Amino acid sequence: MSLAGLRGAVGFLTRFPVGHDETGWEAFTRTPATFPAVGYLVGVLGALVFLVPAPPTITAFLYVLVLYAVTGINHADGVADLGDAAVVHGDPERRREVLKDSSLGVGGTLALVGLLLGLVLAAVPLAGAPIAVAASIVVAAEVGARLGTAVLVCVGTAPHEGLGSQLTGVNGPRSLVAPVLVALPAVVLARPSYVATAAVVAAVAVALALYRWSSAMLGGVNGDVLGATTELGRLGGLLAGVLAWTLWTGDVMGVIAWTLS
């Protein structure tokens, strides 16, 4: 993993002012391993929020606030666009036309509301969990979401020229080995590891589901699909991690009652 590729990934996937230039962008597009690498950075910053001594609902709100302060809203825009495209009747070309429309429709609104609500609901029980559990789930969800994005970059095909084609056109299935290796520490070093495993597996499963859906409905993987994969993969990872923790501890009803109290 080159320093230029990592800098390009941080510049593109976050709001950190590391600069944007053609060299960094080119290195980033050819290094899908930088996707999960950036996931560690975002995950650690998000996990720090759970150290704040505040009520669970406040902590959950701060988590979402920090999340988008660090990553920006470009990926969430992909969720909105896919939400609008999903409710359109027609062929893939018609749905791709909807993706280009800057106005927000009912499908996109519902998708964004569901995304934000899901993030908050997942973060509330984490606020009462041991910090090791919360950190393991948050970091694994970020790494897993970006691993899923890397999967689409390596196996997907873009339906037209654009951001998606710049990433998928220079990578192939063999490029997926490095992202997997980069993501492994998120599981191996987590405590407990089973919550991190659930988060990563769920995030990648979301990516594969979006890959199948976009191939059938849009004709391939474009920039909106990649952005939505990161956002929805994170949500799936968080929910799966929380569910794994509650089921393993055998206190599902206790956690639900505590969350609603």
Image: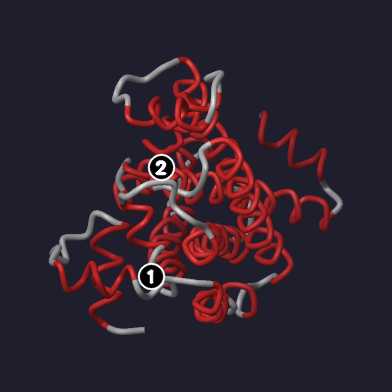
State the residue at coordinates (32%, 60%).
166
> Is the N terminus in the top left, top right, bottom left or bottom right quadrant?
bottom left
> Is the C terminus in the top left, top right, bottom left or bottom right quadrant?
top right
Q: Residue furthest top?
A: 106
Taking 74 as reference, is 175 above or below it?
below
Front-lying residue, 143 or 51: 143
State the residue at coordinates (61%, 40%).
216
What is the tally of numbered marks visible in this picture? 2
Return the x and y of residue 205 as percentages of the image width and height.
67, 54
Look at label 2 and name its amino acid.
Asp
Return the x and y of residue 106 as percentages of the image width and height.
47, 15
Q: Which residue is mark 1?
A: 170
Q: Which residue is mark 2?
A: 224
Q: Label 2 to label 1, Cα distance in Å?
A: 18 Å
Secondary element at image label 2 = helix
Front-lying residue, 130 or 6: 6
Return the x and y of residue 102 as percentages of the image width and height.
29, 25
Look at label 1 and name its amino acid.
Val
N-terminal of the pair, mark 2 or mark 1, is: 1
Secondary element at image label 1 = loop
Front-lying residue, 243 or 225: 225
State the residue at coordinates (54%, 74%).
176
* Quadrant housing residue 200: bottom right
Return the x and y of residue 140 as percentages of the image width and height.
57, 64
